[in-house]
Amino acid sequence: MILNKYFGVLSLLVLALPWTAAANNSRSLTLSFPNGVASGDTTHDSTILWTRSAVKGVLQFEVFHKGNLKVKEDVLVEDVNKPVKLKVKQLDPDRNYDFKVTGPDGKAITGHFKTAARGTKPVGLSFGVTGDWRGELAPYPAIKNANGLNLDFFLKLGDTIYADIASPAEPNGQAKTLAEYRAKHQEAYSYHNGLNSFARLQRNVSIFSTIDDHEVINDFSGGALASTDPRFGESTGLINQTELYRNGIQAFFEYNAISDRRYKTEGDLLTDGRPDLYRMQRYGRTAGIYILDARSFRDQDLPGVGNITDPLQIGAFIAQSFDAGLDHTRTMLGKKQLDRLKADLLTAQQDGVLWKFVAVPEPIQNLGVLGASDRFEGYASERSELLGFIDDNHIKNVVFVAADIHGTIINDLSYQKRSDVLQAIAATGNPLSAPQRPTSAFEVTTGSVAFYPAFGDAVLDLLTVIPGGKAILDQLLAATGVANLEEFRKLPMAVKNSAMEGLINQQISGLGYSKIGLQDNNLIKAALKQGGNTALFSFGWTRFDIASHDQTLKITTYGIEPYNKESLVNHSAEIIARKPAIVSQLVISPQR
C-alpha cells in the first residue's frame, strides 16, 4: 500500500517511540490482547478506545500526538470476556493520534486514529466499507489490504457475526446466552492461521459499526410483536424487548468501539430505552456520513413471492409493499430515526456539505421481488418517502451505501410515489403502471468479507430450486455459451459478473426499474475506470476516495476469489495468501 509523504513521516516518528517494539510483539498481542485494540465513533474532538485484556487488573490507556502525551487514564478489567472502553475527549480536529494500551502484565499494544476535519475548506477523505463475515471463514484475507494509515475511517455495515450459524465458537448453531454471543465475537476478532485481519485494520483505522440481523438472529424484525416469531420464545412485548435481542445487542456493543447510547424514555413503545445506533459525522464541508439501524425498529416483513415469474404474485407483493389497504406507513427505520436522517440531510445541504453518505445495512435500490421482503423494497412506502424527500428538497450528492446481499451492485435510484401507485391500482390493478421518478441519488452495495456463497453463486443455487428458476438459468447459460452450471462457474470472474448483471437487468427492467449502472441517468456524471458496475462472485470491500482538489468521488471495489469452510481447512496457506485486486472502479463528479 502506497502511503503519502505525510504518513510516511508519521510512520517514522511512531517507529522511534520507545514502547513500539514491545507493542508489536505478536505473541504479546495474541496472549494479552487476543482481539487487538480499536478506536471508534471518532468525531472532530473525541473517540472511543477499545480492547479486551486476557488478564484481570488495571489497564492503562495513553494517547499521543507527535510523540507528546495528551491523555493517560486507567480502566479496571474485572471480566476477561468483557472488553473495556474509554471515551477520550478534548481532542483537536483533523489530527493523527497514536495510542498505547498497557495491560496488567506489563504487555503493551499500540494503535492509531484520525479525528474528523472541521471548517469550510475542501478536504480529501478516504474510507472503507464492508459487511458480512462468518467466524469459521476467518482470518478474512479479503480485507488484508485495507490496513494502513491512509484511510480516515472504516465502516462495518452489519452481520459482524453470524450468531445463528454453527462455527467452532458455537457448534450447535444459534447463540442464545450472553456468553455464547460473546464467544462468537471473540471468534471473529481473534487470530486464525497466524493472521488477524480485523485486529490489524482496527489498530490503524478508526471504526464505525452498526448491526444487521445476524448479530441476533436471521431476518428478525425488531418492531414486530414477540409473539409473531417463536424463535424468541416470548409472548409479550416487541422483539426488541426480548432477552435474545438484548443478549445479542449487548455483546455487539461490548465487542465494538462504539458508545452505548440509548433512546430516551418518552412514552414511545417502539424506542423507549432501546439501543441508539444512529450516527452522524461531518468531515468539514466535504462530506457527512449517516449510519442507520435498519433492524431494531422495523415492522414485520411481508411474505415473500413464491414464483418470481408469476405477474399476479409480483403485482400483489408490490401493492402490499406500498401498504395498499392500510392507513399507515409500514416502517423499516422507525419514525424517530427516519426524521433524524431527514433533518440531518436537509441541514447538510443547507450548510453546503457536498457529499452525503447514507449507510444502511439493506439495499435501497430496486433489485426485483426475489428476497425483496427483507430489503427496502418490502417497505416501499417508507422508501418512497425518503427518496421523495431527497428529491423534493434538491438534496444533492446523496450516496447510499449498503451490504447484506454479499455482492457489489451500483445503481441510480428511482421511486414511485405511494399516491401514484394507489391510483394505478385503483385504475388498472397494476401498481407497476405508476411512473418511476428518477433522482440524483445512487447506491453502492459492498460484497461480504467472508460469506459463502457469494451473491452470484447464491443466485445460481436459488435458480435451480425455485419455481420458474430453471428457465431463467437456461437463458443465462445460453447467453454465455456454456452447456451447464458447472462450466459457468469456471468462467473468469469478469465474464460471470457481466452475465449476472445482464440477468438482473432482464428481471428489473421488466418491472420498470432502472438498469444497473449510473450511465443511464443524466443527473449523475460517472465514468467507469475498471471493471463493471457489479462484483458478484468475490469476497471483498469497497473504498471511497474524495479528492481534495476537485471533490470528485472515486469508488473502488476490491475482491478475492471466494472460498468455503472445507477449502479453507484443506488449502489454508493458498487462501490466506490471496491478494485483493480491483474488480470495479468508477469516478463520479459532484453536482454543484
Image (cartoon, rainbow, N blue to C red):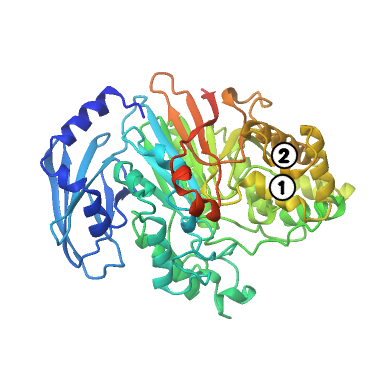
Answer with left or right where residue 24 lies relative to residue 517. left
Cα gap from disc 1 to disc 2, whole angstroms: 10 Å
User: Looking at the rendered structure, which numbered label has been put on residue 460?
Assistant: 1
Q: Can residue 524 be seen by looking at this rendering?
A: yes
Badge 2 is on which residue?
A: 488
Query: Which residue shows up at 38% across the image and 52% down it?
Result: 193
Q: Quadrant of residue 583?
A: top right
Give the quarter of the image for residue 85.
bottom left
Residue at 48% across / 27% down in the picture?
Answer: 553
Amino acid type at circle 2 is: Phe
Residue shown at the point (52%, 56%) measured from the top left: 212
Classify 142 as above or below 233. above
Q: Look at label 1 and name its amino acid.
A: Leu
Point out the tag, 1 or 2, that comes first from the N-terminus.
1
Q: Residue 284 location, x and y as percent? A: 35, 32
Q: Nearer the viewer, mark 1 or mark 2?
A: 2
